[in-house]
Amino acid sequence: MKTAPNFKALIKTVCISACLVLGSTELMAQDKNSQQPNDFRIIIEKSGNQIKMESDKGAAWVKLSLSPDNTTPQAIDEYGVTDVNNVNSKKDPKLADFLFTITKTKNGVKLKGIEGTDWKDLEFSLIADQKQMINRSGVLQLK
């Protein structure tokens, strides 16, 4: 007679444990997905004295045109031109969450990743009307 109550207690314990394990696995999967940033792709081009950027993925803006000088970095995020000290707190899950600065150099551009990039610094040459693509991982080959 004692076997039946022990068996019921065992079944109840197994069911509760299974629910806890499955529930925590789902929470970990949701947390893991929320931590992975959306990717972005930006094409950068030097055209005369301007730096032109075109968002291919992950930003609210499509095209930006900047005339940065050689000493003042310009901050760019998923919403466009911004100020590093006054970053937009509005987050859209459909957009990548990134922030970097761009500075025109003598032969190209220098980028400094601040948020949402795997890179800290990127610098590359751009001749007139040459294009280069970047994403959160670094420089990409244009097709």
Image (cartoon, rainbow, N blue to C red):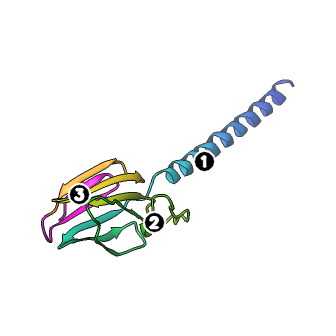
Check residue 80 in the rendering and tell me which mark sits there, or answer none.
Answer: none
Tell me where residue 26 appears, x and y as whole percent: 59, 48
Q: Residue at the spot x=84%, y=30% of the render? A: 5
Label 3 with label 2: CB-CB less than 8 Å: no
Name the one closer to the observer, 71 or 9.
71
Comparing labels 2 and 1, the label whose residue is closer to the camera:
2
Give the mark, 2 or 1, whose residue is nearer the N terminus: 1
Q: Quadrant of the C terminus?
A: bottom left
Name the one closer to the observer, 23 or 102.
102
27 sits to left or right of 74:
right
* Amino acid found under the numbered disc labelled 3: Leu
Check residue 95 in the rendering and tell me which mark sits there, or answer none.
Answer: 2
Per the image, label 2 sits on a secondary structure element best described as loop
Crowding near the residue tagged with mark 2, few <14, some 14–19, many ≥20 C-alpha atoms within 10 Å: some
Q: Residue at the spot x=41%, y=58% of the render? A: 99
Q: Residue at the spot x=63%, y=39% of the render? A: 21
Q: Which residues are magenta?
A: 127-143
* Figure quadrant of residue 141: bottom left
Mark 3, residue position: 140
Mark 1, residue position: 27
The Cα–Cα distance between marks 3 and 2, rounded to whole angstroms, is 19 Å
Tell me where residue 120 appears, x and y as whole percent: 34, 47
Per the image, label 1 sits on a secondary structure element best described as helix
Q: Is residue 140 magenta?
A: yes
Give the mark, 3 or 2, whose residue is nearer the N terminus: 2
* Amino acid found under the numbered disc labelled 1: Leu
Per the image, label 3 sits on a secondary structure element best described as strand
